[in-house]
Image: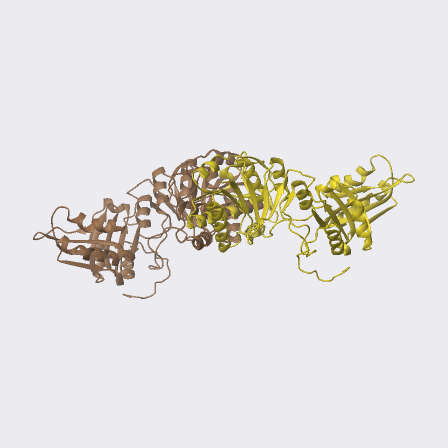
Chain colours: A yellow, B brown
Amino acid sequence: MALIVQKYGGTSVGTTERIKNVARKVKASRDKGDDVVVVVSAMSGETNRLLALAEELAPNPPAREVDVLVSTGEQVTIALLTMALEQLGAPARCYTGPQVRILTDSAHSRARILDIDAKQINEDLQLGRVVVVAGFQGVDESGAITTLGRGGSDTTAVAIAAALKADECQIYTDVDGVYTTDPRVVPKARRLERITVEEMLELASLGSKVLQIRSVEFAGKYKVPLRVLSSFKEGPGTLITYEENPMEEPLISGIAFNRDEAKLTVLGAPDVPGIAASILGPISEAGIEVDMIIQNVSTSGATDFTFTVHKRDYEKALGILEGNKEKLGAREIYGDPKIVKLSLVGVGMRSHAGVASTMFKALSAEGINIQMISTSEIKISTVVDEKYLELGVRTLHTAFGLDDENAPVEAEDEKA
Amino acid sequence: MALIVQKYGGTSVGTTERIKNVARKVKASRDKGDDVVVVVSAMSGETNRLLALAEELAPNPPAREVDVLVSTGEQVTIALLTMALEQLGAPARCYTGPQVRILTDSAHSRARILDIDAKQINEDLQLGRVVVVAGFQGVDESGAITTLGRGGSDTTAVAIAAALKADECQIYTDVDGVYTTDPRVVPKARRLERITVEEMLELASLGSKVLQIRSVEFAGKYKVPLRVLSSFKEGPGTLITYEENPMEEPLISGIAFNRDEAKLTVLGAPDVPGIAASILGPISEAGIEVDMIIQNVSTSGATDFTFTVHKRDYEKALGILEGNKEKLGAREIYGDPKIVKLSLVGVGMRSHAGVASTMFKALSAEGINIQMISTSEIKISTVVDEKYLELGVRTLHTAFGLDDENAPVEAEDEKA
């Protein structure tokens, strides 16, 4: 008998039929003898419906009231799921975030969980009840309703699992696990049986949007065993692990890519102390987030400085650099929004030399020119022309032995 | 400068346009220098939408979860109204029932308010804020969400007005006040400037559904000055008063009617002690509520016993009486669902003789036969054939000088 926290997202509870389906899955776990706490999101579409109402009243509605408004979404779901469970003969109790009580800071619409009172949940579990908790929401010290921001239900589930010292936190979603890369790009992509939390963090932040990144950080911090699996399809999903066992670790776990970035280069700036701060200061003051940053060793006292930003900030960032060109003493400002970032992720690469050279060789064999390189302990990222996205990912997937040999035969579509 | 509690029902906040209209009305009161607390219902249709979802999951959903579900309706409205107020430049704060906190007993779906903590509201008012509170809902000792039952938002408004010792509690609705009778039946019906709480209670329970009866009882208990007025039309509405000033009281304030009752008679039952209990015991055990009860003085040891029930319970009640006929020793059981109850209401009748005789004379002059009579201190009710409803109400309205002489000329439609 285990204590399991299960989280079902908006798509999984999008209709009353789907809520019945979730109730049956929860009851099945219960019937196996497990204690179950369920965390749910708002029915899909509900949050947007509520926000549309708000926008009819105020173009920029105050965050405090937006939280009061949108938190009703999960409250509806917990009530409906509890009714469905009781209808199936499974005794259940539901609680809003404030009721549990999930204490957060006061940063409306992006609050952070500070503490969870597990007493009420434990009491209900001891009475044999399924406990249904509203995800995404909490309450601050003053009693105001807060929300954790979009996707925050994952974080709620992990935080409750940590507070209860649950045996496993299961995140039910519309995919059946974490894949070696996006199966829409590489049909031979394979579901991973397990992945380390560090790899998951790199994959998530690089665009594999299976789990909300904050929930993974949270799980890592409290060592909550986390499993991603499908609401609609039976299967073991992917387990996110914390113990490292390099002997068993595959070299590379997955290949992530990000098409949302744009590249900016300051050419021939004087290589003096503080030049990086002079270039990036005005960018960050304008609220623009920077991802990769590369500065080459200088030759002849001048340096080339390149960084990437989100595509939506490209024009703005370019304008800022152009405006500062003289002040920076730069020879030229150059930008390119038509790029893509490809990343290898794997804890195994720590103990293996040659991952980078295998990567560069494989790309060059396909005639793919590498524009930028950046590395961390468990990740190597390269920036290439966006037209090489599919070819690049497919090439690396094969080069690192990730292909699922049982996958359907891939359609021929070389260099799109 | 006064402290006003305003309550707006579901129709008044049924769309975002109407919520903007309410925000303008609240701001106008604020701009006059009044402190305003606003109590709102769910947007019209919302509660039914939520209950329909519940019924898809459970034919008879548990009351505890229904309360969690439907209480989201007012929570949406308080958030939207507060946004609309802030958009107009009126600082505002909103609170759910549990947040205020409105403490109730644990009778889900029909809870009673036990206590209101006015501290938070007073703090906000002192900071110059409009305070927006969700009607209809509260929280019990254990922290569970409760609701007061349909129409409970009126009760919330009155209870808050009592707790704050407000100068006036204004109930905004889709009618512009309390009328001498239903204007759809008598076009000459007049809006009353004022009415006593006792009269209001008699009128409300008799079918003039302007205010929820529990809220009127509550207002009477705490002597909260209560005013009914329209959300859509300017005007002073009707003030519900507590001081009695018989010199100024009109004889009759209004005429109520009820077409939902049916009449049952046990003829020739032995006039022995306990016969009333023998007749009505099985009726009340079947969960049927009885309204009027009349037993005539007996002649020759036998008595005729008549009572009225809701039309929907007529067949059931008749069956019960038929089944008990022999046991009761009755000669005959007789029933008639085609009746209507007409009632005169007025505190003035206490000090005036002759009201009853004027009533009976007026009805008989029109050939209307009276089947039953029942009286209380401020009310006289008669049961007549349902075909006399319109004629009877119109006749009494004129006979007691209630006609509005400025009303549009009434169409000729004698004895329908």
- Asked whether, in this view, residue B304 is left or right of residue B215, the answer is left
Which quarter of the image is occupied by the C terminus of chain A? bottom right
Task: Return the residue found at the far front.
Answer: A247
- Asked whether, in this view, residue B220 is left or right of residue A105, the answer is left
Does A114 sit above or below residue A30?
A: above
Does A53 sit above or below residue A298?
A: below
Asked which quadrant contains residue A279, the reply is top right
Q: How many marks?
A: 0
Q: Give percent across and percent down for residue B161.
A: 42, 39
- Asked whether, in this view, residue A181 is left or right of residue A384, the answer is left
Residue B91 appears in view: no
Does B183 sit above or below residue B138?
A: below
**Closest to the observer, B364 or A188:** A188
The residue at 74%/56% (across/down) is A390
Q: Give percent across and percent down for residue A255.
A: 71, 49
- Asked whether, in this view, residue B317 is left or right of residue B161, the answer is left
Residue A306 appears in view: yes
Q: Give percent across and percent down for residue A13.
A: 52, 51
